[in-house]
Amino acid sequence: MDEGRNLDIVFNGSLCAFCKYFAMKLNEQRKWLCAAFPQGIPFDIANGDFDHRKPHPDDNGIVFEIKDGVVLPDWVDEDFQRFAGDSEDEAES
């Protein structure tokens, strides 16, 4: 996996730009930083494959919280709808 892609993907399908913990800084591997992931936001969150409104194993107990005064665009709930059944699926397993 090309970790440098994190730079290009973070604003495409990700909640990061709307999060109050997002730092708008890159580390030396070109990974975006935030309070939850001070060493770099994982690729699955940065590219929108993981809905960080739910806990992630490496998030230091910090999940997405919207920035003050920001309204999430309509695509967010539509896009993340694919995660809606995750907890039910895991419970059935």
Image (cartoon, rainbow, N blue to C red):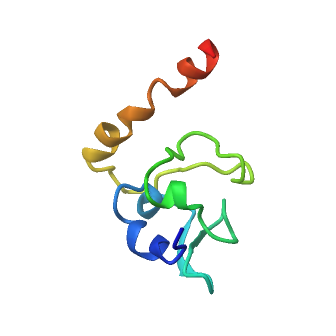
Q: Is residue 49 above or below residue 78?
A: below
Tell me where residue 82 sits by quadrant: top left
| Residue at 45% across, 76% down | 7
Q: In this view, does 76 lie above or below 88?
A: below
Q: In this view, does 19 lie above or below 23?
A: above
Counting from the top left corner in percent of width and height, residue 22 is at 53, 66
Q: Quadrant of the N terminus?
A: bottom right
| Residue at 44% across, 27% down | 84
Counting from the top left corner in percent of width and height, residue 45 is at 52, 55
| Residue at 53% across, 42% down | 53
Residue lying at the far right in this picture: please name it.
Answer: 60
Left or right of 16 in this view: 74: left
In front here: 72 or 92? 92
Counting from the top left corner in percent of width and height, residue 75 is at 26, 46
In front here: 4 or 71? 4
Q: Is residue 47 above or below residue 34?
A: above
